[in-house]
Image (cartoon, rainbow, N blue to C red):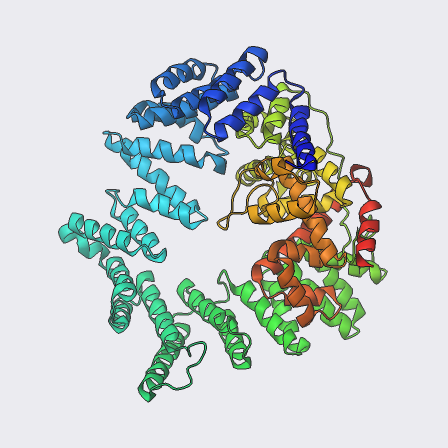
Amino acid sequence: MPRIFIICSLMVSLSAMARADSYPGGAPYVAARDAERGARYADAIAGFEQCAKADPELAEYARVRAAVCRARGGDAAGAIERLRAIADGPAEHAVSLFARAELAYLLYEQGGSAEAVRLLEPIVNTPISPKWLDPYERVYGDSLIASTNPESRTQGFALFARMLGEARTRSQRLEAANRLANSPAPRQRLDAADVFVNAGEWASGIKTLDALEAALGAGRAAHATEIDYLRARLKLAMAPDKDAGRTALLSVAKSHSDSASGRLALMYAARSYFTAGREPEPKPKKEPAEAVARRQSYRETATTLFDLMAGQLPNTKETGDALWWLARQHLDRDDEPAEIDAALAALQRLVAVCPNHERASDALYRVATILREKGDAQAAFAPLTRIIEQHPDSAYASAAAYGSAVILLAQEDRARAVSHFERAVALGGIGNFYAHRANQCLAEMDQARAGASTAIAAPGIGNYLRPIAVEGMQDAAQQLSDKWIERMRFFASHGYEEAEWEVLAHAPAVLESKRAGAYLAAISDAGLAATVDHIIERTKWGLKDDRPTAEALPALYPRAYWTAVQSTARETGSDPLLLLAIARQESLFQARVESHAGATGVMQLMPSTAAWIAKTETAIGPGHLENLDKPASSLRVGGYYYRYILGKNGGNTVYAIASYNAGPGNVSKWRAQFDAGHLDEFIEAIPFDETRDFVKKVLGNYAAYHSIYPARNRVAQGGYVEMAAGLAE
């Protein structure tokens, strides 16, 4: 192994040891966890036992982990015996909760569902119910369903019905649906079938509907509309003759036009006819006349059906969804002017016939964007002001106020422009990109708000964003000497879930404390910002009119893993607050989160990207690459990668942030295509919705951090600007 890699690996080990110094058993605990991750269970057990002997603070946690490793190594009975001893400890102790949860897992696997329910009930029924408890909730629900008690089974299915309603991902929905498919309640089975159909799990959808109809017998009539609709969707998806499926959908729509299922059937029929009528890409050079005529017929039918929904079913979710889908189809081919015009017409129709639809503000903003791109800024002004007036709570309100202010400024209507910039600040709030951008525009117009600070000296973009003064803002860096806080920090610094158990055990007392803000900020600073975010969302602590108060801001925008962030910032000449801004958007500081694409860790790096940057940066060694799920390693690799892409983009912060999400190649292409030298125009022209949103949110985070934390809490304030200037030369 090259000498530099050996040194870097030693640096990772020494860093871990430094964080563990406050605990005599810290180093063996970390080593044992690494052995556990590598499925070296005998080594892990020995390490945890060594920790338990050396360190009373970590001893019980080490014994729980040793028992878990024992079970994974094949000795479930021995593990259960050891976990019982710890689980019988005081109910309010974090390690007791941890032991009970792991014991419940093992008991459920051994058929002890009744005891698993007893152990998990007080854990999963906590008022804050953080999302990391979901795996334990599933075991709890499965244990209830496995019961012979009908009331318990009903409770279990109800839990999965709630989880289905709260699910945000396809996998979460399917997990809940797989349970509900076996529910005795027709409503829950129908919900499961609907999930399967929408997810394209056709076989599961058919199986669920077959079983439901067999169980209903003569009672099918009560649910016939939904069953017929789902059967028609399945026929459309699976039958070779798609026209038969479309006919079935239209039959349901005609027979049940006054029901949601009937409207959905009409919507999916319209969508299917539209898709069948689209010109293929690339267009064939020669095509039979009958094929061309058939597509024309499909297009005409689709137009008729969309017109029917807009004319006869206004102000319904299904009509709004249909028109939104139609607009998106046209926007996907935005290289053709006719497609842009068709998208504009669909969006305008949506806001006309479904003004209260959840996508109405989005549609209005896209209408304004299309009109501006066509060069008709005056026409764009109306939909922007409509968002401000009719949808002031929408995600587009601040953007609309900013956009309308820019139009007014171009018309030399200075007074109204100032008013609209001020509204952009007020509507957006502390973490909104447009609010900080508007604040800078006000300063340039000599209209700086009271208490406003200087602009952010971001590399390569000049005075582009300005912090927003926060009334009542205080330094959140308060010393907390609680033992559980120190344990939580130790566990969280390594990305261990043990930290979450400490928060779960102490959250009720924290929220009742007069120092709740300091405690929640400390929890977030440790890296558990996602849990704190959920606690605030559930309890409404620190919110006023659904907006965070000054007391809540440090908890929502924490200096997570601050020591590691500062270290990476110094080494790379970066602004540490920008590293925080990226990590907050990428993962909300969750150490072990992994994307569908395989990106992992706090900085959400693809292993291939990390391996590549290690070849160009001697400061990155094998120890970092092997531990991307550890915060310090992820931050280090991500920081060096960011420095690399900043250099590739001439030291320009906006281009570098875009590159972090979409890759340097795409950004290089975009700069060549539409970089007119104005950052606003470049950002709005980014063709990837995800990247455009990412850039705005990272910049909003970045400006929020500069608003919340005074200069003395930053490092490398001059260094990163000088480094970026050097890269630009």
Q: Quadrant of residue 123?
A: top left
- In the rendered view, does 253 fall on the left or right side of 417? left
266 to 33, vertically: above or below: below
Query: Does residue 546 show up?
Result: no
Q: Which residue ends up furthest to the bottom in the rendered image?
A: 289
75 to 623, vertically: above or below: above
479 to 141, vertically: above or below: above
Measuring from the top left, give residue 286's x and y in whole percent: 39, 86
The front one of 283 and 131 is: 283
Measuring from the top left, give residue 565's x and y in whole percent: 70, 38
The front one of 92 and 79 is: 79
Name the residue located 78 percent from the left edge and 72 percent from the top edge: 413
Measuring from the top left, give residue 197's x and y in whole percent: 32, 57
Q: Quadrant of the C terminus?
A: bottom right
- In the rendered view, does 397 fall on the left or right side of 50? right
The front one of 206 and 576 is: 576
Q: Quadrant of the N terminus?
A: top right
Q: Which residue ends up furthest to the top in the rendered image?
A: 53
Measuring from the top left, give residue 572's x and y in whole percent: 75, 44
Name the residue located 44 percent from the left edge and 80 percent from the top edge: 283
Q: Quadrant of residue 398?
A: bottom right
Query: Does residue 668 show up?
Result: yes
- In the rendered view, does 279 fall on the left or right side of 525? left
Q: Quadrant of residue 305?
A: bottom left
- In the rendered view, does 139 fall on the left or right side of 475? left
Q: Please state the total of marks drawn on the protein image.
A: 0
The front one of 237 and 270 is: 237
